[in-house]
C-alpha cells in the first residue's frame, strides 16, 4: 500500500510534546475507518509511525490524529506546520467492538495519551449514538496541565459521566488526586452487565483489569488497545508480534480473554 | 433521625458487620462536619481519631517548605482516613484538610483500641479491614511512583 499525500490543515498543541493534527487529502476520497483503528503516518525522509484515529469518523473528510513526540518519527511529525505534507497509509487493525455493547453499561477507561483512541467512542456516546444503556469515562493523567482535550471535557460532562484523576494536583483541581484505579474501585459497577474499553499505559491497564475482575466484569467483556512498534501494519514483518498475535492485524484492540496469557510473559 | 449505629452501617468500611458490633462501636463515634479549609488531622500531632468520610473531599497533604501543601491523594465519600491511632506513638503522619464541606463520623482511637482488646473477634475483623485498605493505598502509591503517564517510562532496573 502506497502512502497518500495529506496536508496538515490544523495543528493544535495539547500540552508540551503532545499535539493533534487535522489532515486533509486534496485527491483521495474520504477515508472510511472505525474507532480504535490506526493509520501509518509518514514523515517524509524520516519514517512511519502507527497513530490511532482520535476524531469523528465523518469529519468532513478530515483525519484527526493525536501524537506524542517520543521518537524520531513523531518528533519529525511534531515539526509539521499548517500546510505541510505527510504520507498516510491506512486504515489498519481491528477497532473497538461497538456492536457488542447494546444494552450494556460501557466503561471507557483511559490513561494519559490513551484517551486519543477512545475519543471517537466518547464522541459517539456524547452524541447519543451508542446503544449502550449508560456510558462512563474514567480518565487518569499525570497532572491537570497534561490532560488531553481539556477544552472539550467540560462539554462531555454535560452528557456523559466523566471521572478524572491526576497523579499530582493542587487545590484548584476539582477531581480526584491519586491513581485512576481508586475511583474505579469506588464506583458502582454492575459487573455482569458491563463492557469495558481500556487504553493507556500497560501497567495502568493491568491494574484496572484487576479491579474490573473483582467487580465481576467477565474477561470476555474487557477490551484493551495494545501498543508495540509497528512497521508494515499488515501482519507481514513481525515487528509487532506479541505471542501468536500481530498487534497491527489482529489488534490493536483485543479482548482480554483472548490475550490474558500473553500479559504474564515478560519480555513479549 | 438516623442513629450513629445507622450511619456506621451505611459506610462501606462497616458493611457486613453485625448490628451488635455496630452498637458496640457506636459509643466511640460522633457525627462531625468540617468546613472547607478545616483540618481533620494535622501532621505530627496526636492521632486521636479515625474518620469515616460520608461526603465531601479531603486532601491528604504534607507541607513542603517554600512550596506549600503538597497533596498526595484525595479521599471522598465512602473512604476512611487515619490509622496512626492504631500504633504507638499515635502521631499523625500527614495533614488531612477538607477541600469542601465534609461530613464524617469520627471514632475515638483510644476507645476503639479498648473495644478491640475487649472483643478480639471484632478487633481481628477491623484489623483485616484496615489491612485491606492499607494494602490498596500502598499499591496506589506504588503506581503513582511509577509515573506511568510520563513520556519516558522508568528504565528497567531503575528506581523511578
Image (cartoon, coloured by chain):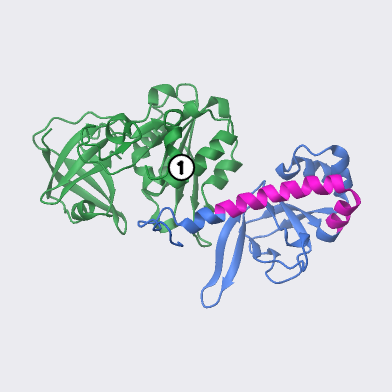
Q: Does the magenta-highlighted stretch encompass residue B115?
A: yes
Q: Is mark 1 on a helix, strand or loop?
A: helix
Q: Residue A148 vs residue B66: left or right?
A: left
Vertical placement of residue A123 versus B136, above or below: above
**Quadrant of residue A241 within the rendered picture:** top left
- Look at chain B in the picture and name its colour: blue
Q: In this view, does A49 lie above or below A14?
A: above
The N terminus of chain A lies in quadrant: top left
Q: In this view, does A9 lie to the left or right of A171?
A: left
Residue B113 painted magenta: yes
Q: What stretch is highlighted in magenta?
A: B111-140
The chain holding disc 1 is A
Which residue corresponds to mark 1?
A205
**Chain identifier, green in the render:** A
Residue A97 in sight here:
yes
How packed mark 1 is, by other alpha carbons closer than 10 Å (few <14, some 14-19, many 20 or more), is many
Query: Which residue occupies the foreground of this view, B24 or A136?
Result: B24
Rendered residue at 50%/25% (across/down):
A104
Amino acid at each position: 500500500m502506497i502512502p497518500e499525500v495529506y496536508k496538515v490543515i490544523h495543528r493544535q498543541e495539547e500540552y508540551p510534546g503532545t499535539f493533534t493534527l487535522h489532515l486533509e487529502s486534496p485527491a483521495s476520497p474520504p477515508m472510511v475507518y472505525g474507532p480504535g483503528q490506526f493509520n501509518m503516518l509518514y514523515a517524509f525522509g524520516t519514517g512511519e509511525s502507527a497513530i490511532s484515529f482520535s476524531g469523528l469518523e465523518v469529519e468532513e473528510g478530515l483525519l484527526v490524529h493525536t501524537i506524542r513526540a517520543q521518537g524520531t518519527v513523531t518528533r519529525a511529525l511534531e515539526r509539521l506546520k499548517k500546510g505541510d505534507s505527510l504520507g498516510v497509509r491506512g486504515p489498519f487493525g481491528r477497532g473497538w467492538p461497538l456492536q457488542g455493547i447494546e444494552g450494556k453499561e460501557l466503561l471507557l477507561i483511559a490513561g494519559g495519551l490513551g484517551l486519543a483512541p477512545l475519543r471517537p467512542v466518547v464522541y459517539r456516546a456524547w452524541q447519543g449514538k451508542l446503544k449502550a444503556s449508560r456510558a462512563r469515562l474514567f480518565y487518569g493523567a499525570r497532572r491537570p496541565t497534561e490532560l488531553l482535550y481539556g477544552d472539550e471535557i467540560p462539554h462531555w460532562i454535560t452528557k456523559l459521566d466523566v471521572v478524572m484523576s491526576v497523579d499530582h494536583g493542587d487545590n484548584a483541581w476539582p477531581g480526584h488526586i491519586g491513581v485512576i484505579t481508586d475511583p474505579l474501585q469506588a464506583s458502582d459497577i454492575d459487573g455482569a452487565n458491563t463492557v469495558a474499553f481500556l487504553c493507556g499505559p500497560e501497567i495502568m491497564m493491568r491494574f484496572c483489569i484487576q479491579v474490573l475482575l473483582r467487580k465481576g466484569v467477565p474477561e470476555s467483556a474487557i477490551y484493551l488497545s495494545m501498543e508495540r512498534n509497528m512497521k508494515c501494519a499488515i501482519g507481514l514483518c513481525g515487528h509487532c508480534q506479541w505471542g501468536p498475535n500481530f498487534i497491527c492485524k489482529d489488534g490493536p484492540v483485543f479482548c482480554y480473554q483472548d490475550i490474558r496469557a500473553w500479559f504474564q510473559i515478560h519480555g513479549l | 433521625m438516623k442513629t450513629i449505629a445507622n450511619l456506621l452501617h451505611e459506610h462501606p468500611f462497616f458493611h457486613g458487620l453485625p448490628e451488635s458490633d455496630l452498637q458496640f462501636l457506636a459509643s466511640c463515634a460522633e457525627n462531625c462536619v468540617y468546613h472547607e479549609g478545616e483540618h481533620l488531622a494535622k501532621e505530627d500531632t496526636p492521632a486521636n481519631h479515625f474518620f469515616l468520610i460520608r461526603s465531601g473531599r479531603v486532601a491528604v497533604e504534607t507541607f513542603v517548605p517554600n512550596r506549600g501543601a503538597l497533596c498526595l491523594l484525595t479521599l471522598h465519600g465512602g473512604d476512611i482516613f487515619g490509622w496512626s491511632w492504631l500504633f504507638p506513638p499515635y502521631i499523625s503522619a500527614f495533614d488531612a484538610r477538607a477541600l469542601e464541606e465534609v461530613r464524617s463520623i469520627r471514632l475515638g482511637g483510644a476507645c476503639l483500641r479498648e473495644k478491640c482488646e475487649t472483643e478480639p473477634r471484632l478487633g481481628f475483623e477491623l484489623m483485616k479491614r484496615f489491612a485491606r485498605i492499607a494494602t490498596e493505598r500502598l499499591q496506589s502509591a506504588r503506581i503513582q511512583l511509577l509515573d506511568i503517564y510520563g513520556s519516558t517510562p522508568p528504565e528497567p532496573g531503575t528506581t523511578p
